Amino acid sequence: MEKAFSGIDIEARFEHARDVIREAGKRAMEYYEGDAADLAIETKTNALDMVSIADKNVEAIIRDRIGDAFPEDGFLGEEMGIEKGDNDCLWVIDPIDGTACFVNQMPTWCISVALMIGKEAVIGLIYHPCNDELFSAVIGDGARVNGEPAKASSAKRVSDGVMGIGMSHRLPSSSIVPVIGQLLDEEGMFIRNGSCALMMAYASAGRLIGYYEPHINPWDCMAGIVLMREAGGWCNDFLDLPNVLEDGGPILAAGPNVAKHLADMIGISYRG
Ligand code: IPD
Ligand code: CA
Ligand code: CA
């Protein structure tokens, strides 16, 4: 876990954030299991782009609890935006990823918390409360599921497993339809469970051969990037994309043996 991030205690932050994400998950579950009519849902741009009172309150819990322990750190969260800190640490938070599932009583939603130091993502935590599964990774220390080592898929062809695919209305259908066509033509298959972060977590545990979404925001994928790389998988250089914290960009994560093939298929630059 030793890396040169001078003066920043990554291990202490990891341990604290691991407790916080479970606590946030407990609160989110209370909303999920409560009366759906009490959720106060607002739509942002369309019926799939929504936010509930749970999203806002869960983000507030995470920011408050991490901020109490590390007051000098900054935050970027989907619901509350950016708040710069007094050091190079930036916590990147999606309080509920898969809100459309959450508000419609489907269990594929999760909480995603990552820590960036400068331009590097160093901690990734994704908690899936309905399954009580915590996917965790610290740079240089491997990836884990509930404490047990996690490994990305060793699939050699796309037909050896299932690919996670994400899509929103931020881009036209033409940005995803050809990719799905090529995957099927190679006897591959895809799944979209409504949560980018959860599908990336599954890819880091080798359950999916990879994950692709033509446009994603940093809070959806930052923890997944750390998890995937620490699990021996490959991700595109998402953090090198221009203005990525503001504008987002494409994400491709894949097992090491199919990564180049998928990158070529999709048209994403591959550096092994
Ligand atoms: C969405 C989910 C979805 C992905 C979208 C995201 P939200 O986040 O991750 O799977 O395809 O691009 O916006 O709105 O549920 O937090
Ligand atoms: Ca999200
Ligand atoms: Ca969200």
Image (cartoon, rainbow, N blue to C red):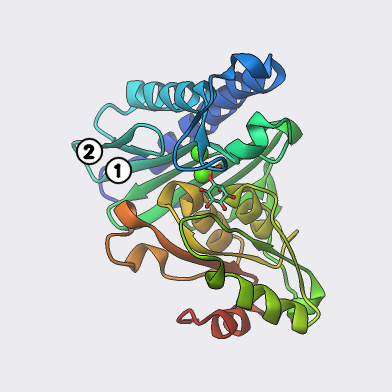
Q: Local crowd at mark 2 within 10 Å, few (<14), some, or many (≥20)? A: some
227 sits to left or right of 157: left
Q: Nearer the viewer, residue 143 or 207?
A: 207
Find residue 89 and report its horizontal and vertical position in percent: 29, 43
Q: CA distance from mark 2 to mark 1?
A: 9 Å
Q: Local crowd at mark 1 within 10 Å, few (<14), some, or many (≥20)? A: many
Vertical arrangement, residue 2 with respect to residue 90, above or below? below
Vertical arrangement, residue 56 with respect to residue 73, above or below? above
Find residue 84 and report its horizontal and vertical position in percent: 22, 38
Mark 2 vs 1, N-terminal side: 2
**What residue sits right under mark 2 in the picture?**
84
Which residue is found at the position 60% from the left and 27% from the top?
25
Find residue 215 and report its horizontal and vertical position in percent: 47, 61
Vertical arrangement, residue 252 with respect to residue 159, above or below? above
Residue extending furthest left? 86
Q: Which element is circle 2 on?
A: loop
Task: Identify the amino acid type marked 2.
Answer: Lys
Q: Do we see residue 171 in this rendering?
A: yes
**What residue sits right under mark 1 in the picture?**
89
**Does the beta carbon at disc 1 come under 8 Å from ligand 2?**
no
The count of marks equals 2
